Amino acid sequence: MNPIEGHLPTRSPLHDILAPTGIAVIGASADPTKRGYKAMVGLIKDGYRGDIYPVNPKADMILGIKTWPSVTAIPGNPELALICTPAATVPDLIAECGRRGIKGAVILASGFAEIGVEGADLERQMMAKAEAHGVRIIGPNTSGIFNLHHRINLLALDSVKPGDVGIISQSGNMLLSLALEAQHNGQVGFSTYVGPGNQSDIGFNDYLRYLGEDEHTRVATLYVEGFRDGRKFLEVARDVTAMKPVVVYKSGSTEQGQKAASSHTGALAGSYAMTVDLLRQSGVSVVQYSDEILPVAEGLGLLQKSRGKRVAVISDGGGQATIASDRLAEAGLELAELSEATRQKLREVLFPQASTVNPVDVAGSTDANPSLLATCMEIVAADETVDSVFLVGMFGGYSTRFAESLLGDEMRGAEAMVDLSNATDKPLVIYSLYTPIKPPALRRLHEAGLPVYASIEQSVRVLAALGERGQYLAQYHSHVRETPVDARPELTAMFQRARAEGRDLLEFESKQLLRHHGVQVPVERVVRNEAELAEAVAALGDTSLAMKVVSKDILHKSDAGGVKLNVVGEAAIYDAREAILDACMAYDANAEIEGVLVTPMAKKGVEVIVGVIRDPIFGPVLMFGLGGIFVEILEDVAFRAIPLSRHDALSMVDQIKAKRILEGVRGEPPVDKEALVDLLLKVSSIVAAYPDLKELDLNPVIVNADGYAVVDARVIVDRDSNATDKDAHA
């Protein structure tokens, strides 16, 4: 199965750098302990076809190759330089590279921004030289690169073979781990590897674009500690995932992990949950555990996608079928409901005691005839209710477990599975407990391009990634993002006035912003004096009211005694106003009180929160979840990058674990989901239109069967005078 057709808007400039026809090794060495030696060995041993230019003023020849005293003395035209010298030498060497016409430099040295102020200053000097002389920088503090299809192995890694998995990893040890795992696997090979290091110049988005264009890469795989420009990465990911799978393992899922990532690479590690949601919004397959990286990359590279999440399980053991069913359910996959016609065909070939209800348990039917498993797979694969097929058990080990004479039948079964994989667009994933010893039948499957795993859990993660990718691609053309509303001059002026006064929007101003752009906000009045209170009583006095202090100095109104609910009747309204003012003055005698907000109590419903932040890495991001106190206790929220598409808004509502509450429980009617989606889209379009809006917090929003009501709204104003310019291109 081939990736769907697609293209990137411009050709990456990294092709010349990562597939150069000439390489200068600055700091080349004859000392086997030096990186300059290992790089030379890697190029020579792998048969690099381009020109090699060792640079070392103290040597005439290194490993049989003419050596040059300086970069400027090189006679040819290398596109890439590998700099193996200490950090302090790098800025001047970059300038020399630029004068020599070298397009890119791989900088191995540490001692730059990751160590603190002094290193950051050195990194700035390096980048000033690079920009002045037109040299692109990989690193610094990088483990290096390889491009195996071009026989470039600057890491001199042994036993890595060319393949279709591209790797970008901020950890050199993680690359080594993946390389050793691939060696044990025996079938996985790599196209390009880059260690981005500090990303002082070239970042993850640049590398991903290159892998998206690279003809030798079928799946892009990234180990990420921190993004420099997360918003740009998301944009590139949307383009690349339309063509080929992208797998990301994001470290820093805990507070401790985030601190470790920052100290290791000088990168910023934002909220892990937010990062995962934004990556998935762009079609990226996110893996949670490091031992899933290579299996998922292999499975997606080989199989690309499935139509959906309905899985048929074929098993020769009830226990493992049960385990597989549990793991599938936990991963959000479904056991396909096999048609009666499919079950009848299974009954015709299996023993009477076999179970033909998914998961299918052959119950000994294959003990003397293991190729029958292939027949069962073919039968269920033909069922329209099935999106993918999962073989679970001991296939490949029948000749070991029962009789050597079964080897021939197992090989025939393997060939039948290969034929089936070529004839169907439904992924076939195999788990066998004999995978570690690599019996002939499993080797045949693996060599033919069927993923074979030694873990049910890894197999299920692959199936989940295939289903997620299939569903993303099916909805790809519906991911049209909403356009911003037109900013209204009077509202822009309101932001400017708040900034000039050094404050955020007051609650009634925040609601005015929402109301002007079609958000459902209850009728309300701001009472500043006795006359306005009398008008409010005349207009609203017969209803149950909520009354809240309006003050730029009192953010937590309830803590200050600034909120009264269910206020009914003229006398109660007057008393509530006095009580609010007295309590707030006692709470903060210096607080400037604008007045008291009076509004009808919202109709009963479910409290949700809609929030917005402008993340320093990913730009404007919208959050949705249960509101009130639950948002802090349960942390059951979903994030999406702004602007949203309708599909994004729907998926946010469906993502939270509490969605069953929204669907109606204990006799309560379901909430108006369409109105909720409309609210999310309206907030997205408002935020995109007003760059002075730094944060927004609608909590709670009361949602019910009739729509919603924004009960409380807070807008934090960006006090940075460059906010408008800063976000214009975000």
Image (spheres, rainbow, N blue to C red):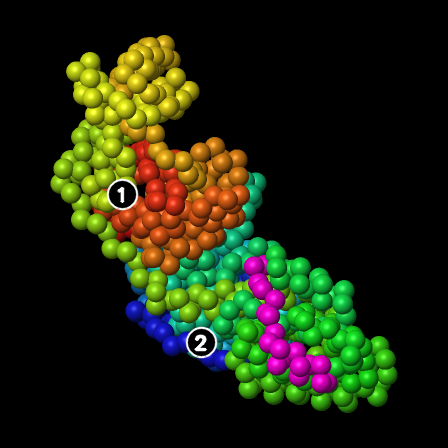
Q: Residues within 10 Å of mark 1 (few under 14, many from 20)?
A: many
Name the kind of residue labelled 1 in the image.
Val
**Left or right of residue 481: residue 486:** left
Name the kind of residue labelled 2 in the image.
Pro
Question: Residue at 50% across / 51% down in the picture?
Answer: 225
Could you tell me residue 285's position as x and y percent?
50, 62
Could you tell me residue 6's position as x and y percent?
36, 74
Q: Nearer the viewer, residue 521 or 131?
A: 521
Q: Nearer the viewer, residue 224 or 601?
A: 601
- Secondary structure of the residue carrying tag 1 is loop
Of tags 2 and 1, the one toward the viewer is 1
- Give above or below for 295 relative to 411: above
Direction right: furthest residue: 403
Residue 518 can be seen in this image = yes
Q: Residues within 10 Å of mark 2 (few under 14, many from 20)?
A: some
- Give above or below for 275 relative to 505: below
Which numbered circle lies on residue 519? 1
In magenta segment, residue 90 = no
Residue tagged 2: 3
The range drawn in magenta is 331-349
Q: Nearer the viewer, residue 402 or 126?
A: 402
Based on the displayed image, in which of its 4 quarters is residue 282 positioned?
A: bottom left
Which numbered circle lies on residue 100? none
**Left or right of residue 706: residue 541:** left
Could you tell me residue 219's position as x and y percent?
49, 70
